[in-house]
Structure formats: C-alpha cells, structure tokens
C-alpha cells in the first residue's frame, strides 16, 4: 500500500522533483546560484518562452502539434519592431511613418499571430491535413513572408534596432527599486497570461472540449462537440500567444531580425512534454508547462553559470526529453 502511494506521489510530482534536484545540483557546485539575482534573471529570460509554451500546450492537448510557433515569433517581432523605431533612427524601416501609439503595433503583432493560427486551424480541421504537416508548411511560408518583409527597402535585411523607449520598457522595465527584488513587467505579463490560460483550461467550455478532443476525437463528435470549430479556436488562441511572445521578445531584446524565434517551437514542445502534457493528447496542466519551461531555463542558465559546455547541455536536454516521453508512453500504455 505504501509503495503504491509512493509511486503515485512520484508520478504526480515528478516534474517538480526534477526541478528541485536540478537547482540543488547546480547550487551544490556554486551556492551563488541560489541568489535572488539569478532567480530574477531566469524568470526574465524565460517569460516569453513560457507564453509560447502555453500556446503550444493548447495544440498538444488536442493531440496535435505546432511547428510554426517559432517562425510566428520571428514574424511578430519584426512587424512590431519595424513600426516602433525612434523618429531619428538613421535606418528607420518606415522613414515617413508618424509615431504610432505603442499599443497599435503590439496589437498588429498579436493579430498576425492569430491569423496564422486561424490558417493552421482551418487547414487541420477543414482540409484534414495532419497537424505536423500543416504547421510544417505554414512554418516555411511564414518564414519566407517574414524574410521578404524584412528585406524591403530601406531596411534590406539589416537588424531592426533603435526601438522606442516606451516599447522596450515593457520588456526591460520593472516594479520596485532597481535591484534583485524588483519585479519585471514581462514576468507580470507572463503570470497574467498563465492565469488566463489556466481559466480557459479549467473553467470554460472550450477547455473541456479541448481535453475531450485530445482524449478521443471520435467520442467528442458523438457527444455533440463541434470538433472542427473548436480546433480553429484553439489554433487561433495558440497563434495569438505566439504573437504576444514575439512582440515581448522584441521589447526585451531591443531589436528584431527575421531569424528571431528560430527553434523556439522545439523548446516549447519540449517544455510541454517535460511538463506533463501528453503526446497522445487529453492531458496537460498550466503549472506543469511552467515547470517544464523553468527546467530548461535552469539547464540553459545554470549549466552555463557553472561552466558546463553548451554541447553537454544539449545532451542533457535531449536525455530529459526522451525520458519524459518514455515516461508518458508508459503511463499511457498502463491505462490501456
């Protein structure tokens, strides 16, 4: 009986145990890793990734996958940055454009992400194209379109810089006194987004339908759920979150190129899987996704902090991903 309870405990809280062990292992090598400064930096660097991973979780829970998220991040970063440069910047993307209210390009970026999500959802639901292939296609299309836009005169593929302070403050500003105990705006935004996603997952009909579709799409149809319509909604929300992530990434870094977001899709999917989102669909939680993002944030920051080679970091990340998927498959087979 005790063994069963212990197994249940480790099954339910494995992700958090791994996170604690990672932090403890790195701190044992260098105790400075436990400082508030380091925690703040990790949260700051991974806030946009958390938002992107939450978007990916919507799709994964339905049993699909989305490879376009990274390129959507690049598109929306370039779009928003190109419209928010200072008036005196010598290589301004739009030399004659008057200063827009900061919220306008932000909304344009989010809307662009939502549009790509709508297209993904339509292709998957209406044309019955497998999500992997559908989003692989849109990934390539979005990158091509973004590169054409990025190459327009007078920019001609130069990194977009000279962004307005009212925009970059969103990504680098904070509440409280300057120091380790300040709370960055971008972290607050990520927390608010995570709460909204949690509400959608747990308190709305769309959330219930999403889990039902991922659990058994045929049963969902029989129970009266409009699967096609719900898939379009879900992909659209995911796209909007990618768009928000791209805008915030431009604000955080103070610039953008067409290569922004490269490989972010794999990081987002990996964080979801490690965080307990089932590759078979129907299972996933917001806290689990956030823990998955933090695990990779700790790996990237912590192992660099103690001087571990980036190549070893890739090996460790790969092993964690494989172990998480193997664990997920064992749980799935045990239920059958």
Image (cartoon, helix red, strand yellow):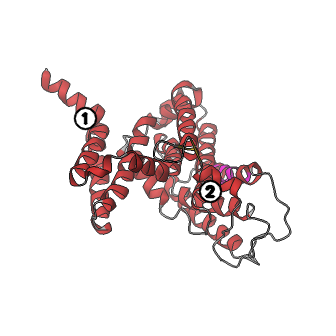
Residue 273 visible in the snapshot: no
In this figure, which residue is indicated by the disc labeled 1? 334
| Depth order, front residue of 61/125 | 61
| Depth order, front residue of 212/102 | 102
- Which contiguous range is marked in magenta? 108-117
Quarter holding the C terminus is top left
Residue 326 x %, y %:
27, 47
State whether residue 131 is above or below residue 155: above
Residue 12 visible in the snapshot: yes
Question: Was residue 240 drawn as part of the magenta stretch in this picture?
Answer: no
Residue 196 x %, y %:
57, 33
Q: Main secondary structure of the magenta part?
A: helix
Q: Badge 2 local density, few (<14 within 10 Å), some, or many (20+)?
A: many
Identified at 29% across, 52% down, the residue is: 320
Quarter holding the N terminus is top left
Identified at 82% across, 59% down, the residue is: 99
Give the numbered dot on residue 251: 2
Numbered circles on residues, count: 2
Q: What is the secondary structure assignment of the residue under circle 1? A: helix
Q: What is the secondary structure assignment of the residue under circle 2? A: helix
Q: Nearer the viewer, mark 1 or mark 2?
A: 2
């Amino acid at each position: 009986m005790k063994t069963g309870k212990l197994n249940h405990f480790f099954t339910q809280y494995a992700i958090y145990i791994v996170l604690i062990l990672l932090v403890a292992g790195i701190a044992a090598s260098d105790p400075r890793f436990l400082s508030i400064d380091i925690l703040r930096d990790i949260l700051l660097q991974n806030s946009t990734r958390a938002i992107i991973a939450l978007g990916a979780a919507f799709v994964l829970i339905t049993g699909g996958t989305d490879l376009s998220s990274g390129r959507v991040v690049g598109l929306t970063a370039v779009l928003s940055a190109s419209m928010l440069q200072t008036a005196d910047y010598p290589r301004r993307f739009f030399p004659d454009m008057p200063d827009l209210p900061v919220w306008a390009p932000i909304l344009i970026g989010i809307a662009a992400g939502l549009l790509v999500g709508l297209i993904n959802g339509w292709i998957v639901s209406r044309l019955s194209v497998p999500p992997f292939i559908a989003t692989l296609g849109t990934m390539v299309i979005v990158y091509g379109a973004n590169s054409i836009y990025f190459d327009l005169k007078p920019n001609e593929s130069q990194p977009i810089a000279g962004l307005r302070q009212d925009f970059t403050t969103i990504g680098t500003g904070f509440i409280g006194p300057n120091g380790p105990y300040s709370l960055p705006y971008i972290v607050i935004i990520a927390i608010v987004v995570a709460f909204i996603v949690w509400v959608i997952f747990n308190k709305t009909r769309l959330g219930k339908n999403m889990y039902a579709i991922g659990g058994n799409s045929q049963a969902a149809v029989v129970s009266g759920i409009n699967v096609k319509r719900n898939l379009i909604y879900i992909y659209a929300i995911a796209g909007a979150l990618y768009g928000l992530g791209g805008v915030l990434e431009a604000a955080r870094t103070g610039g953008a190129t067409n290569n922004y977001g490269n490989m972010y899709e794999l990081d987002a999917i990996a964080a979801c899987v490690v965080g307990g989102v089932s590759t078979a669909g129907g299972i996933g939680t917001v806290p689990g996704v956030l823990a998955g993002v933090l695990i990779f944030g700790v790996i990237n920051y912590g192992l660099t902090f103690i001087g571990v080679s980036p190549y070893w970091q890739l090996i460790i990340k790969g092993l964690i991903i494989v172990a998480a998927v193997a664990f997920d498959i064992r749980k799935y087979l045990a239920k059958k």
